[in-house]
Image (cartoon, rainbow, N blue to C red):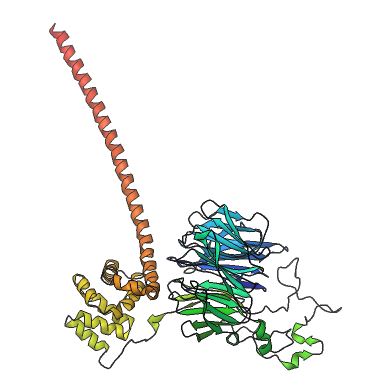
Amino acid sequence: MPHVHDDRGCRSPRCRVSGSASVPREWLGLVARPRCRVSGSASVPREWLGLGAALMASSPCFVPQVKVWDTNSGFCFVTFTDHTSCITAVVFSSSGQVVLSASLDGTVRAFSMLRYRNFRTFTSPRPTQFSCLAVDGSGDIVCAGARDSFEVYVWSMQTGRLLDVLSGHEGPISSVAFNPYRSILATASWDKTVRLWDMADSWRTTETLNLSSDAMAVVFRPDGKELAVSTLDGQITFWDPEKGNQTGSIEGRHDLQMGRKEMDKVTAKHSSKGKSFTALCYSADGQALLAGGASRYVCIYHVREQILAKKFEISCNHSLDAMQEFLDRRKMTEFGSLALIDEGAGDEDGVNLSLPGVRKGDLSSRRFKPEIRVSSLRFSPTGRSWAVTSTEGLLIFSLDSSCLFDPFQLDEEVTAGAVRRALRSGQWTLALVMAMRLNEQPLLQEALESVPCADVPVLCSSLPELYVERLLVFLATQIERTRHLQFYLTWAHQLLMLHGQKMKNRSVSLLPAIHSLQKSIQGHFTEISKLCDWNRYNMKFAVCLSKQRGVKRAAEELLDGSESDVESAEGSRGEEEMDL
């Protein structure tokens, strides 16, 4: 996935960002606006990026927009401008055909990705500001949390009517999330609680999880059997939603590695005590957790071991604030930091450094340094990439294994020459297994395409179960760009038919591979179906045109025949008169 930026939104000086994801389509939605938070969402097979922005124009007014981008080309192909205030959350439905956005204007709007229009608007009985948004797996129930009334509103997608108002929290609602497989809604609030609501039991509160500090974010594991909550004290706690007990915790405050801002009176070590993770996201298999907050680092934790697996630095731009752990003491004076003083402005002899093209508003360039922070991050449903939105912009990290040598159960006898010798002798299974152990894409492609199509079912039945998942991932990447579409589809069909029953036992770990395979097949289906529809319509038009011409030709022949009959009748009548 390429790097995508929106200069008008994400690079605004006071822009914060956040997001959310949905399956099975791989779209990503984000919201960006100055001085406000930002959100987003993802879905497959087209890699689209939806970006909502409330931009500061030349007037003091905001221009809230929801933009949808194609990450392959980097072009924005649709912009929705129905909101009248800052957008706080964006989420895609499970089908990927509807994108919903919540705003501070007191509305939640649903936009169709087929007709590109706002087809549903959800409102509350009294004006309120919505801070978070969620939609259930079926796409029929929409929930939004309020920051001023401390309530959660529930609507029906089909009718647009308000179904219920969930009250009970004593603080602003910071995050809402649906269980992917059950009718359970989790709501996190600043009142140090997370409440679980049962949709099937008249939205009754089934559990109330008491936390050590204010809840900042809540997210369900993809299988719905675990709940992760981020709190203001820098901890990430894991809960069992069935029993309501805590199963683990991660102390992540020190992993944020906070920097010191220009106006901070304390060191970065002491200022990190009030910082926390504000965005969480599980990986597609549920084994890793992505976390980000008011820091230049994004952390990936191993959920089962509850340890830090890797830390990514999202920016090295020192023009942003809170990038350095220690400040330059030479710039510190009794009046404050010299970096905060605007040179050339405010003095009698000072000259305003005018910005190019500015007629009103800020007539001089500013020395304001926006603070580096992460406000949204989402894994792709395929698990091959993840995106993060920050003050620097939108960054997409992708896993490209084709450029790496990553062997699997390698020994001295497994070589490229041994693979080719096995292919020449017709030992297809041995050659394929050795190629997968070497894990070199060109060699694996050569071994796979050397197998006769008639032998594919036999080879799939004798393939060890250990290599089925790796072969499915390879097939998904090859189907997306190969010319031998039928050959690779035969492989995928036989693998799923012969090993499908065993795959059900570990469906969670195989979910990224299945999503990637579905994305590749759906992409080809979309392209080929358009061509087939075009040809079918042309053939129908040709048939109808030929029928019309045939009817016209038959009518002309009938008319010619009737005229000849009349002429022959008149000729015979003339002959009879002559005989008389």
Asked if residue 324 is positioned above or below residue 513 in the image, the reply reads: below
Q: Left or right: 543 with respect to 345?
A: left
- Residue at 52% x, 58% y is 141
Residue farthest toward the right in the current orientation of the protein? 348
Q: Nearer the viewer, residue 314 or 442?
A: 314
At which x and y percent is residue 527?
37, 61
Q: Is residue 322 left or right of residue 398?
A: right
Q: Please indicate, yes or no, whether residue 28 appears anywhere in the rendered image.
A: no
Residue 102 can be seen, yes or no? yes
Percent position of residue 169, x then y = 64, 67
Q: Which residue occupies 74% across, 83% down?
A: 263
Residue 465 picture quarter: bottom left
Residue 519 drawn at (x, y percent): 39, 67
- Residue at 53% x, 72% y is 219
Q: Quadrant of residue 272?
A: bottom right
Task: Name the residue at the left extreme.
Answer: 579
Q: With 300 as the anchor, is 275 left or right in this view?
A: right
- Residue 296 occupies quadrant: bottom right
Q: Is residue 496 above or below residue 445?
A: above
- Residue 185 against residue 313 in the figure, above or below: above
Q: How many numbered badges does the structure rendering display?
A: 0
Nearer to the camera, 575 or 210: 210
Q: Quadrant of the C terminus?
A: top left
Q: How far across and down, in percent of the image, does residue 288 sit?
A: 47, 80
